[in-house]
Amino acid sequence: MQATRSCSWVTMLTLLAMLLATPAYAASSTLYVDGATGRDRILCGFSPNRPCKTISYVIPRASVDTTIQIGPGTYNETISITQNLGWMTFEGAAQDQTVIVGNGTDPTITVWGPNTFRFRQLTITGGRHGIYVNSAHIYGESIMVSGNVVNGIRGEYGASIELSGVAVRSNGGNGVYLTNGSAGSVLNSEVSQNGALGINLQRGSSAEVEGSMISNNLGSGIGMYVGSSASVRTSTVEYNHLSGVDASNGSAFSSWGGNLIRYNSDSSGWRAGVNILNGSSGVMIDSPGDQILMNNGPGIFVGNTSSLLFNTGTVSSNAGNGVEMYLNSTSQFDGGSVTNNSGYGIFCGIVSSKYGQPGTLSGNALGPTNCN
């Protein structure tokens, strides 16, 4: 009898040791976190009735294609995902109910490649960056990224960032910053009230923007630099302190039509509704045409060996020339209208040329054009 009991105790202790040595006790497609009712303990997270208390505690238990359900509450955590988990989803209770707050020094959430992550129904705040993405792919759906020290979202080294129904607001630097060959899409989202640019594309990065509001940023609304590009459709770009759209250093801006670009620019005289500089290009040919209105400077500025192709849209009521060119730059017109601007409709500066003619060129304060 005594030998049997001893054997039983040895067996139980052996099983317990094996259990403690294996953090991911069983593969689970859903893990659970609840800041109010959860506890960080053995076997937490595998059931909604036994949630963990913190997100960081449950992540090592995740396997490929795991969803982490995060209950209402404020989670004061800095989260870094370095292991290769393939697909993973962070699902909050609601955008205004599940809040992840960083420490102000590190990104609130860091995702390293080659992972693919989806963030839904969350607010992400309080970090150096809200979300930092290095070589990984993320989807943001119905999230708020606000109140971070520098960038709301930063992606680099081939990162891919797709945002839908997202608000990126009131961050100290850029709303969305992509660099070193990264790519993004911003669909039906708001990028506003950030301390630098709304969307900043650098060093061969690209973005597609559709159905979105880019407004009230202290820099330009959308900027592309050093061989970067942006395609914009049916979006409003307004009240940005510098240019509405800014393309420079061999970059390319393409309009897919239906954009409203208004009330942008400071009074420097060269910042504009759309600014195309330093070997860059702008293409505005898709219907319905853009409305470039009431900017505090030229409607479109093309400078320093840059080019514009303008076939549709309206450039009207801007506090400068409608379209202004300088330093070996060209504009090709084949339709659209340039009307009621405070300067010329089309202005040719040093060694610059106009080809073709808008469909309507009238009502400009200094005349239709000074170009030869």
Image: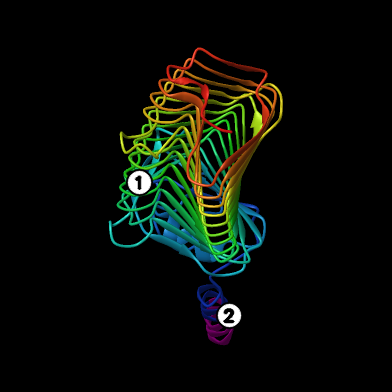
The answer to whether residue 337 is above or below residue 101 is: above
Q: CA distance from mark 2 to mark 1?
A: 63 Å
Q: Which mark is residue 245?
A: none
Labelled disc at residue 196: 1
Is residue 334 rendered to the left or right of residue 245?
A: right
Q: Nearer the viewer, residue 241 or 63?
A: 241
Predominant SS along the magenta part: helix
Q: Position of residue 233 (x, y in %)?
A: 63, 31
Q: Give how far across and how far down residue 207 sits, in percent.
A: 60, 47
Secondary element under disc 1, as helix, strand or loop, is loop
Q: The magenta stretch spans which residues?
A: 1-12
Residue depicted at 30% across the width and 47% down the height = 172
Labels 2 and 1: the sequence-earlier one: 2
Residue 11 is marked as 2
Spot occupied by residue 114 in the image (x, y as percentages of width and height):
63, 66
Left/right of residue 148 with respect to residue 154 in the rendered view:
left
| Coordinates of residue 125 in the picture (x, y in percent) | 35, 46
Report the amino acid beneath label 2: Thr
